[in-house]
């Protein structure tokens, strides 16, 4: 999966082999922003245009544009994983939220290290 960034928004890019075009969609917000292009340059142009149009539309209707990743998520765990997380967090004298934050941080750091090693 490839990602693009513009003006603080990120888009996931895929190739549609049937239509022979690149298709992108902005991730990290609830509003739906998608775009496509038959070349990389056209894809970039349409991504920027999609974000710019979204910002203009929000202003026009008096809505605050969504920002990526506000920091709140709803997660679903199996009952046994939920129990383990609750018990381990209690053992560590931290909230289950803090326990999950630390687990996600640890996983992200490991992934970043893998990525850095692969690009070294």
Image: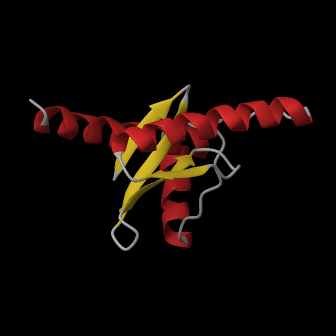
Residue 59: image location, x then y, percent: 83, 29
Residue 7: image location, x then y, percent: 56, 25
The quadrant where residue 86 appears:
bottom right
The quadrant where residue 95 appears:
top right
Residue at the far left: name it: 120
The quadrant where residue 112 appears:
top left
- Evaluate whether residue 67 shows in this view: no
Residue drawn at the location 60% of the way across and 57% of the way down: 75
- Evaluate whether residue 116 shows in this view: yes
Query: Would residue 114 appear left or right of 42 to someone viewing this image?
Result: left
Residue drawn at the location 46% of the way across and 33% of the way down: 5
Q: Nearer the viewer, residue 35 or 96?
A: 35
Residue drawn at the location 67% of the way across and 52% of the way down: 32
Query: Would residue 115 appear left or right of 85 to someone viewing this image?
Result: left
Query: Would residue 15 appear left or right of 88 to someone viewing this image?
Result: left
Residue 99: image location, x then y, percent: 51, 42
Query: Would residue 102 appear left or right of 29 to someone viewing this image?
Result: left
Residue at the far top: name it: 7
Q: Nearer the viewer, residue 93 or 73?
A: 73
Q: Nearer the viewer, residue 8 or 36?
A: 36
User: Above or below — where is 120 with respect to 74?
Assistant: above
Residue 48: image location, x then y, percent: 55, 34
User: Above or below — where is 47 with respect to 74?
Assistant: above
User: Above or below — where is 23 with respect to 70?
Assistant: below
User: Above or below — where is 104 with respect to 79?
Assistant: above
Q: How many marks?
A: 0
Residue at the far bottom: name it: 18
Q: Quadrant of the C terminus?
A: top left
Q: Nearer the viewer, residue 87 or 77?
A: 77
């Amino acid at each position: 999966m490839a990602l693009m960034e513009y003006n603080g928004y990120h888009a996931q890019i895929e190739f549609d082999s049937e239509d022979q075009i690149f298709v992108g969609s902005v991730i990290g917000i609830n509003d739906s922003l998608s775009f496509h292009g038959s070349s990389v340059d056209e894809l970039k142009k349409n991504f920027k245009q999609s974000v710019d149009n979204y910002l203009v539309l929000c202003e026009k209707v008096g809505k605050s544009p969504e920002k990526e990743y506000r920091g709140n998520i709803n997660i679903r765990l199996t009952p046994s994983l939920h129990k383990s997380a609750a018990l381990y967090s209690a053992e560590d004298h931290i909230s289950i939220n803090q326990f999950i934050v630390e687990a996600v941080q640890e996983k992200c750091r490991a992934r970043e290290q893998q990525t850095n090693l692969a690009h070294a």
